[in-house]
Image (spheres, grey):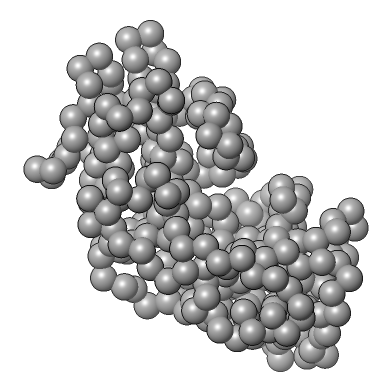
């Protein structure tokens, strides 16, 4: 069922289109839309963006049933993320993206999200700005080479976490990320193809990183200090012997992290596409070294 309430600024769809909730049968058409604009389509991420009741993907369909637009929303308590916003090339400039966005925002707000964030392309920014979104702190993308001398802290122990670690991991993650990612973390912990590495420093959780062969990269990647990030990176390289480098993306507000990477000789590529609306929530950007994907935060 679609959100019942759309505010007075909501954009209607063109008459020949209809908006509906996406399901598993829509995964390939959504992946095709993403591929058409040069975006990777990870099956696990698209599924996570459909996982009721905390996530929903909406598609706009023409009279033949073909999908011509998509968007998704995922809730982490008071924090929500918009993602997967794509409209097929022949249907752009018709208000389809705006209509999908309004429906996604209504869904997130009805679920209690007071802070909503997204990662915007240059072309998409005017649409989001018109809905009250503004650019928020810039990020940086980095590639850490295998040959980098990371150093290590003798007190940090890194192990692969499994499903029993969900409560400890969620309790650690929430105040740093700013929301409750328990369902997403549970999915990660149950995925044997992508190990989730957890760092323990002096008997307490101090960070974690999800190692993903797509890229390859780490994300989400959270660490309380650069020495913890170094230990997690070192273990990730051990578990990905074919990777010459691992990708990270971190907010520039993580000053200790950015200074540490620069000190290692790692180039940081600035990026300022993160946008948000609503009051800031309690979070610790100084611990963030990598997000999941744009649609999931």
Residue 263 sits in which quadrant? Answer: bottom right
Q: Is residue 104 left or right of residue 202?
A: left
> Up-down: is 101 above or below 131?
above
Residue shown at the point (67%, 51%) measured from the top left: 190
- Residue 105 visible, this angle: yes
> Up-down: is 251 above or below 87?
below
Give x and y (percent) for residue 134.
Answer: 30, 62
> Up-down: is 215 above or below 69?
below
Residue shown at the point (60%, 86%) measured from the top left: 256
Residue shown at the point (34%, 73%) measured from the top left: 281
Give x and y (percent) for residue 216.
Answer: 75, 53
- Residue 167 visible, this angle: no
Residue 35 sits in which quadrant? Answer: top right
Q: Is residue 202 left or right of residue 249?
A: right
Q: Is residue 55 left or right of residue 256?
A: left
Q: Is residue 268 left or right of residue 123?
A: right
Give x and y (percent) for residue 90.
Answer: 40, 20
Give x and y (percent) for residue 269.
Answer: 61, 65
Report the quarter where the N terminus lies. Answer: top left
Residue shown at the point (84%, 74%) measured from the top left: 148
Farthest residue toward the left? 8
């Amino acid at each position: 069922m679609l959100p019942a309430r759309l505010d007075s600024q909501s954009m209607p769809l063109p008459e020949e289109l209809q908006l509906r909730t996406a399901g598993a049968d829509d995964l390939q058409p959504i992946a095709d839309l993403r591929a058409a604009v040069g975006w990777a389509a990870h099956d696990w991420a698209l599924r996570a963006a459909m996982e009721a009741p905390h996530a929903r993907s909406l598609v706009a369909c023409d009279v033949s049933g073909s999908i011509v637009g998509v968007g998704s929303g995922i809730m982490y308590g008071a924090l929500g993320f918009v993602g997967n916003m794509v409209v097929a090339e022949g249907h752009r400039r018709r208000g389809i993206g705006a209509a999908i966005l309004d429906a996604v925002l209504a869904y997130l707000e009805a679920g209690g999200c007071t802070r909503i964030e997204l990662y915007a392309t240059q072309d998409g920014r005017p649409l989001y700005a018109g809905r009250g979104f503004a650019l928020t702190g810039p990020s940086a993308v980095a590639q850490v080479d295998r040959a980098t001398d990371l150093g290590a802290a003798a007190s940090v122990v890194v192990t692969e976490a499994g499903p029993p670690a969900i409560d400890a991991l969620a309790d650690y993650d929430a105040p740093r990320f700013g929301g409750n990612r328990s369902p997403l973390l549970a999915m990660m912990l149950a995925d044997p193809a992508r190990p989730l590495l957890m760092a323990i420093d002096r008997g307490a959780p101090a960070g974690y990183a999800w190692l993903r062969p797509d890229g390859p990269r780490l994300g989400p990647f959270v660490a309380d200090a650069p020495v913890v990030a170094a230990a997690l990176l070192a273990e990730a390289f051990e578990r990905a012997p074919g990777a010459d480098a691992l990708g990270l993306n971190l907010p520039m507000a993580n000053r200790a992290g950015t200074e540490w990477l620069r000190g290692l000789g790692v180039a940081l590529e600035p990026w300022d596409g993160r946008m948000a609306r609503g009051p800031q929530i309690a979070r610790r950007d100084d611990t963030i070294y990598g997000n999941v994907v744009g649609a999931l935060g």
